[in-house]
Image: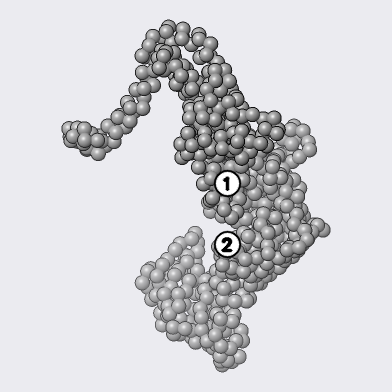
Amino acid sequence: MSAAALRAPALSRVRGWFPALLVLALAVALVFLFLPVVAIFTHTSPGKLISSLGDGSATDALRLSIETTAIAIAIIVVVGTPAAYFLATRDFPGKSLVVTLIELPLVLPPAVAGIGLLAALGPKGILGPALDHAGITLVLQTAGVVVALTFVASPFYLRQAQAAFISIDRSLFEASRTLGASEARTFLRIAIPGAVPGLAAGLALAWGRALGEFGATLMFAGSFRGITQTAPLAIYERFATDFDGALALSAVLVAVSAAILLTVKALAGSGAFGGAAR
Amino acid sequence: MLRADLKARVGTIELDVAFQVPDGECLALAGPSGAGKTTILRMLAGLAEPASGRVECGGELWLDAPRGAHVPPEQRRCGLVFQHYALFPHLSAWQNVAYGLRDTSRTDRRRRALELLDRFGAHHVADSRPGTLSGGERQRVALARALASDPKLLLLDEPLAALDPRTGARAARELGAFLSQADIPTVLVTHDFGQAALLGDRVAVIDSGKIVQQGAAAELAAAPASGFVADFTGANVLSGIARAGDAGLTHIDLDGGGAVVSAEPAEGPVSVSVYPWEVELEPPGTNHAGSAQNRIDATVTTVTVLGARVRVGLSAPQPLTAEITDASLERLGLKSGSRVMATWKAAATRLAPG
């Protein structure tokens, strides 16, 4: 900060010191945030990156990451969309408490989330005997990874979806009802198309969070190659012994995350979902 | 036939209204904002539920609260045109109109939607999204949409409020022509007595959740039941104390000074109303009329030219408005600050309990 304050007066002759300070702050943030990403791609040669991806464990980890995040996102969207609609369209006693509970995983340290999941769904957890009785094992299983991802990523989607539904003019829902549509039809035909930009933003955020999930997955599901070792866990396992391999996997993860973010943004912006492009 | 009896608490007001609208008739609910008008429409449509009440329409019982029936809005077949139209932004005009059409093929629904749009002169915007339409076009699409499912009741919430004055005048003529042919009951809500008079066969004036007077617009203007109704119909309303005067006339001492006479009998505190177009302006000191003429000295505060008519705001012990011709304005040479005498007939002086 002191460097910024010292350098600012030099620029003040051109257009005032404050705008210059703002530009400088942005430049510092940009370099700081983008440099590691650039380094991932430039630290080793592309050929080396590709060859280290040929390793079976790397492709296993990537495949597992994409599969588990896709399943988790599907669960989040299917359950979270109606839940968010309910919160957005109704008032009930204790609503603010419910909203706070839903947002709690946002501020929960991942390690705490992992412990919590073990205490709830582990063999000795609250629901452990019931799950055991039903023949379901989550701990150290791929299903456990999906549970951990869903837990940490769902608040990102729920928050955005709730805001998106709230922003739709209530009279559109009422018009739909007077035109003979039930609430279910109104939800599908009016609420969802109107909320698409917000839902897409929530989906991109939740997916990004799920792809990067590390702590809760490690504690709840472990790190077994091909079963629970997602890309972030594989990177962690490699970086001490095979730094280039860790870099290669990181580069692919950056590319996948960026591709998801950009695709969702582009689709929502173009109104490809039949959304309300206004 | 619509029969409604509704009681509810809305914010700070106690809503309590009962009315009937025969098929083919339009009832205009008129009153200032916050009087509970829109809530009444929402209750008729089933979007809000009164604490107690009964709604019957087209031989069906829609509501019998708190016990008994509450038919949900989607089963009432009630065409509601929202104040800002509430057109679905992600659907084209024809898809908006076809939204309420069911159990038929897409081709069939499009054909029927186009017929309806054509009926309201909006055929050319069928494939446009609502965001690209003008206010007048949106209103036509909204009306076509409300009528698409062959409703048993038509509800219009401030149908002209979202339009600019020019478009509004044309839309009012078209809406009036449509309403005169409609064979279902219509209830419309407006804060403007002029629009209520134009579109409603009957006008019910609502104040703080109650119908204070109901009848043909001309009846309300000619014999307002209270100072509130008189004021709402656009009359000048002055307060004073009435007593029997000479020659069978009633003498009213106005609050703040001055006196007028009226042909109507009254005693005690009254609201005196006179329409702006019944007030004439003369140079000060003119004295030629008989005792049946009211005369009040006043100072001109504003002069607003509206085409061939001129509205003149007057400062007197109680403020007054006169509406005169532009010829009179020229003859009198009025401008802000001019002294004038405002005169009107005793027969044009209506009295209502204060």
Q: Secondary structure at mark 1?
A: helix
Q: Is B185 placed left or right of B313 in the picture?
A: right
Q: Quadrant of residue A251?
A: top left
Three-letter amino acid code of the residue under disc 1: Ala
Which residue corresponds to the image point at 48% horizontal and 11% vertical from the top-left? A53
Quadrant of the frame with the C terminus of chain B: bottom right
Q: Is A106 placed left or right of A26 in the picture?
A: right
Q: Secondary structure at mark 2?
A: loop
At which x and y percent is residue A239?
Answer: 41, 17
Q: Is residue A42 above or below residue A174?
A: above
Q: Is residue A151 above or below residue B160?
A: above
At which x and y percent is residue B162?
Answer: 55, 51
Which residue corresponds to the image point at 67% horizontal and 32% vertical from the top-left? A132
Q: Nearer the viewer, residue B135 or B64?
A: B64
Chain ID at mark 1: A
The reply to whether dot 1 and dot 2 touch (C-beta < 8 Å) is no
Which residue corresponds to the image point at 47% horizontal and 65% vertical from the top-left? B310
| Of the two numbered discs 1 and 2 in the rendering, the one whose residue sits closer to the viewer | 1
* Residue tagged 1: A88
* Residue tagged 2: B191
Q: CA distance from mark 1 to mark 2?
A: 31 Å
Three-letter amino acid code of the residue under disc 2: His
Q: Is residue B44 visible?
A: yes
Q: Nearer the viewer, residue A174 or B316?
A: A174
Q: Is residue A227 above or below residue B262?
A: above
Q: Is B285 placed left or right of B74 in the picture?
A: left
Which residue corresponds to the image point at 61% horizontal and 84% vertical from the top-left? B264
Graded by Cα atoms within 10 Å as few (under 14), some (14 to 19) or many (20 or more), the crowding at tag 1 reads: some
Q: Nearer the viewer, residue B69 or A86?
A: A86
